[in-house]
Image: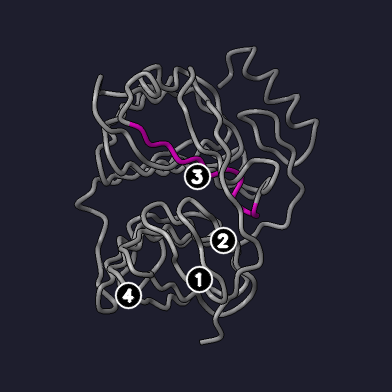
């Protein structure tokens, strides 16, 4: 396999969102504004209730998809269409905002650890005004594989070792893997040609990725190639490996709206103000 090497390394920056939830923003910050089709990657993780308790009260989205992956804790989501669901440890919600939705994500706990990720994935122009939809995926629906000694992978999207993840019908044909590595373990993951790809080390450190070594909470953007090789050092590690087909379309962003031009942004604001979401 022609292994992809690291083209860029990025560290997240502290920020807050919603009603004051403390986050680390890895994609969507000055050092990495976006990685087509990925618009944002936030990591949240704290056992201090005051860092998350205010949650994300009702807010709008249009023109892209949000992917919430819970590692620990419980989060309730609801929207203005009457949909509601509970995200628990190990679960995933892949929400397609499409033409517009008002939704909230609020903690269902007052103490203890809450940890996970939110990824924003752009929609192609032809799908930006599609009907909203949810893919709520319980932990037991996410298949797990052991493709090499000391390697354990949860396959959320894409295919690995003949096993396909439960996320379906996404235009950017994503790969989304949660890879756990025991000390000294190694895995080679084929990725679709032309997909943009990144790896993010969220547990452990000194993970060799291609021709480079990543520290804890460091993200690698990969160059071209057929796949990625990851190897842990002297301690166990856990890595998100994500890839998606770039859209190569103009991007106009304004807060929770991601469209192709400024006129569409103004239309989104007008539609929100007129109650058409």
Q: Which residues are magenta?
A: 35-46
- Bin the neighbour count of mark 3 within 10 Å (Cα to Cα): few under 14, some 14-19, many 20 and up: many
- Bin the neighbour count of mark 2 within 10 Å (Cα to Cα): few under 14, some 14-19, many 20 and up: many
Circle 3 — which element? strand
Name the chief secondary structure element in magenta.
strand
Instruction: Quickly name the residue at label 2.
Output: 220
Instruction: Quickly name the residue at label 1.
Output: 209
Which numbered tag is attached to residue 185? Answer: 4
**In the displayed structure, would residue 17 be above or below residue 40?**
above
Q: Quadrant of residue 238?
A: bottom left
Circle 2 — which element? strand
| Callout 1 touching callout 2 (CB < 8 Å) | yes
Q: Quadrant of residue 272?
A: top right
Q: Position of residue 50 (x, y in %)?
A: 37, 18
Residue shown at 42% from the left, 78% from the top: 188
Instruction: Quickly name the residue at label 3.
Output: 119
């Amino acid at each position: 396999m022609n292994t992809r090497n690291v083209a860029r390394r990025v560290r997240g920056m502290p920020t807050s969102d919603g009603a004051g939830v403390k986050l680390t923003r890895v994609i969507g910050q000055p050092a990495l504004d976006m990685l087509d089709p990925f618009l944002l990657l936030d990591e949240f993780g704290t056992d201090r209730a005051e860092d998350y308790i205010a949650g994300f009260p009702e807010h709008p989205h249009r023109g892209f998809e949000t992917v919430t992956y819970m590692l620990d804790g419980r989060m309730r989501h609801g929207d203005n269409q009457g949909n509601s669901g509970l995200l628990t440890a190990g679960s995933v919600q892949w929400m397609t905002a499409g033409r517009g939705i008002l939704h909230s994500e609020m903690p269902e706990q007052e103490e203890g650890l809450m940890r996970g990720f939110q990824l924003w994935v752009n929609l192609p122009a032809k799908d930006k005004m599609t009907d909203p939809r949810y893919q709520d995926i319980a932990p037991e629906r996410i298949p797990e594989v052991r493709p090499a000694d000391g390697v354990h992978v949860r396959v959320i999207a894409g295919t690995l070792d003949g096993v396909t993840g439960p996320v379906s019908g996404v235009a950017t044909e994503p790969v989304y893997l949660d890879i756990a590595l025991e000390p000294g373990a190694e895995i080679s993951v084929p990725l679709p040609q032309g997909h943009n790809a990144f790896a993010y080390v969220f547990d452990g450190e000194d993970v060799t990725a291609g021709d480079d070594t990543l520290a804890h909470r460091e993200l690698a953007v990969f160059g071209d190639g057929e796949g990625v090789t990851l190897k842990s050092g002297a301690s166990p590690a856990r890595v998100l490996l994500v890839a998606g087909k770039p859209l190569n379309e103009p991007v106009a962003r304004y807060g929770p709206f991601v469209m192709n031009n400024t006129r569409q942004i103004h239309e989104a604001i007008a539609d929100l103000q007129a109650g058409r979401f």
